[in-house]
Image (cartoon, grey):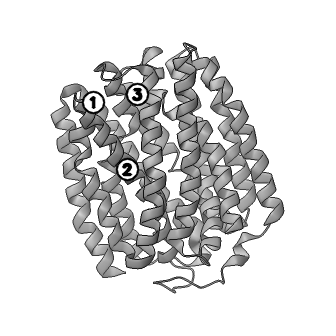
């Protein structure tokens, strides 16, 4: 648990940095001249590059056991976020945003593998839930920083400049974690998994689970597009948008702790909450009513808490330790493909009609639900 908490603090400072930026990238790109399609596409590409390279980084982590090196490189790319203060064109800002996502792709399989080893002793769901809760404290603080900056009538550049502090603290705490626990893989005995014990192989249930992930995530609207909607429809002020995001992150943290324990008790069927809760989100978040939007944002935060906790925890239970990093790489690549598919299609659909966006989201979730039952029968 000490190691889980240390990694959680690393993620806390990391989230202050990049979630603070993500809370305003939609309106920030808008101020630099980007269209709705461009904002949604940049978000989709960013998420794809935040996940697709994990296939290679996860394989590399397993092959070389360089968990710490990959984690340091990935967190080092957080420094691209403060550099957004100097972006004068939306295209340059897009490159920096995507570069930070690439860093997340490099670090995540190695970090999640190390986290899964430690979580073996405390319960997979609970271990990932504690990490996610700490992570989301940072995701709350980051947007609040931007709220205070914009409320004081300063600009986006001043907000991005402040993010140098948490970015550097991230690397400092990460160095402490490595010093304290240089070999976290020793927490878990090789060959141990909860449902499968096929040494060196990824079981069939893992592939069904990945397909379920693809469709459920594709129907989940990204916050950049939601925040774009809030700005162009003048539902709330620019300064309030980071607060809305902070609310979602706070809900995420609470939901993570609740669903973590639920997963440890009932297993995979707890994931039925993902498509069930996503279904009403587009009806609420893309409305013109502040109260309905707020309800949609709360549900959005709950879904994020589930995705970042038990969807990750399930991978550790479904795969052998020898292929854990690679499994996280594949899973996150599929997860990123879902974000890319949704981001690439929802922006143009939004410009055509919000009703088309809603229809697309509903179809994706209705496809994902029976896939989850296939996963449960196969497990």
Mark 3 secondary-structure assignment: helix
- Determine contact: label 1, label 2, CB under 8 Å: no
Q: CA distance from mark 1 to mark 2?
A: 28 Å
Mark 1 secondary-structure assignment: helix
Q: Earlier in the sequence, mark 1 or mark 2?
A: 1
Image: 281 above or below 321: above
- Determine contact: label 3, label 1, CB under 8 Å: no
Q: In the rendered view of the protein, which quadrant contains the C terminus?
A: bottom left
Q: CA distance from mark 2 to mark 3?
A: 17 Å
- Determine contact: label 2, label 3, CB under 8 Å: no
Regarding residue 354, the answer to whether it shows in the image is yes
Question: Residue 236, located in which quarter of the rendered image?
Answer: top left
The image shows residue 280 at horizontal and vertical percentages of 22, 47
Local packing at callout 3 (Cα closer than 10 Å; few below 14, some 14-19, many 20+) is many
- The residue sitting at 55% across, 27% down in the picture is 146
Q: Which residue position is annotated with label 2?
A: 338
Image: 119 above or below 143: below
Q: Earlier in the sequence, mark 2 or mark 3?
A: 3
The image shows residue 161 at horizontal and vertical percentages of 67, 24
- The residue sitting at 57% across, 80% down in the picture is 200
Q: Earlier in the sequence, mark 3 or mark 1?
A: 3
Question: Residue 216, located in which quarter of the rendered image?
Answer: bottom left
Q: Which residue position is annotated with label 1?
A: 290
Q: Nearer the viewer, residue 151 or 42?
A: 151
Q: Which residue position is annotated with label 3?
A: 39
Q: CA distance from mark 3 to mark 1?
A: 22 Å
Q: Nearer the viewer, residue 336 or 151?
A: 151
Mark 2 secondary-structure assignment: helix
Image: 221 above or below 97: below
The image shows residue 317 at horizontal and vertical percentages of 49, 76
């Amino acid at each position: 648990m000490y190691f889980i908490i240390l990694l959680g603090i690393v993620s806390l400072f990391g989230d202050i940095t990049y979630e603070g930026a993500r809370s305003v990238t939609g309106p920030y790109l808008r101020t630099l001249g980007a269209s709705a399609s461009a904002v949604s596409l940049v978000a989709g590409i960013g998420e794809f590059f935040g996940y697709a390279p994990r296939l290679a980084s996860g394989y590399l982590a397993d092959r070389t056991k360089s968990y710490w090196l990959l984690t340091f490189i990935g967190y080092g790319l957080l420094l691209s976020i403060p550099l957004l203060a100097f972006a004068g064109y939306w295209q340059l800002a897009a490159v920096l945003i995507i570069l930070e996502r690439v860093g997340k792709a490099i670090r995540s399989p190695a970090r999640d593998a190390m986290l899964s080893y430690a979580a073996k002793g405390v319960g997979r769901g609970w271990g990932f839930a504690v990490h996610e809760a700490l992570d989301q404290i940072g995701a709350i603080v980051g947007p609040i920083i931007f709220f205070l900056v914009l409320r004081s009538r300063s600009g986006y550049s001043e907000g991005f400049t402040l993010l140098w502090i948490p970015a550097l603290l991230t690397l400092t705490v990460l160095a402490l974690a490595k010093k304290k626990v240089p070999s976290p893989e020793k927490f878990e005995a090789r060959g141990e998994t909860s449902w499968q014990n096929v040494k060196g192989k990824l079981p069939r249930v893992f592939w069904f689970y990945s397909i379920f992930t693809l469709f459920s995530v594709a129907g989940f609207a990204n916050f950049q597009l939601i925040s774009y909607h809030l700005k162009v429809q003048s539902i709330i002020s620019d300064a309030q948008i980071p607060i809305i995001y902070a609310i979602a992150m706070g809900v995420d943290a609470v939901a993570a702790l609740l669903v973590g324990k639920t997963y440890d008790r009932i297993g995979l069927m707890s994931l039925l909450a993902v498509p069930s809760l996503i279904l009403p989100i587009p009806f609420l978040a893309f409305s013109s009513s502040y109260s309905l939007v707020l309800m949609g944002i709360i549900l959005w935060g709950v879904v994020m808490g589930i995705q970042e906790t038990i969807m990750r925890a399930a991978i550790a239970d479904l795969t052998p330790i020898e292929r854990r990093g690679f499994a996280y790489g594949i899973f996150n690549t599929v997860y990123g493909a879902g974000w890319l598919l949704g981001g690439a299609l929802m922006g143009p659909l939004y410009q055509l009609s919000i009703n088309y966006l809603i229809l697309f989201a509903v179809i994706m979730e209705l496809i994902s639900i029976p896939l989850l039952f296939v996963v449960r029968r196969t497990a």
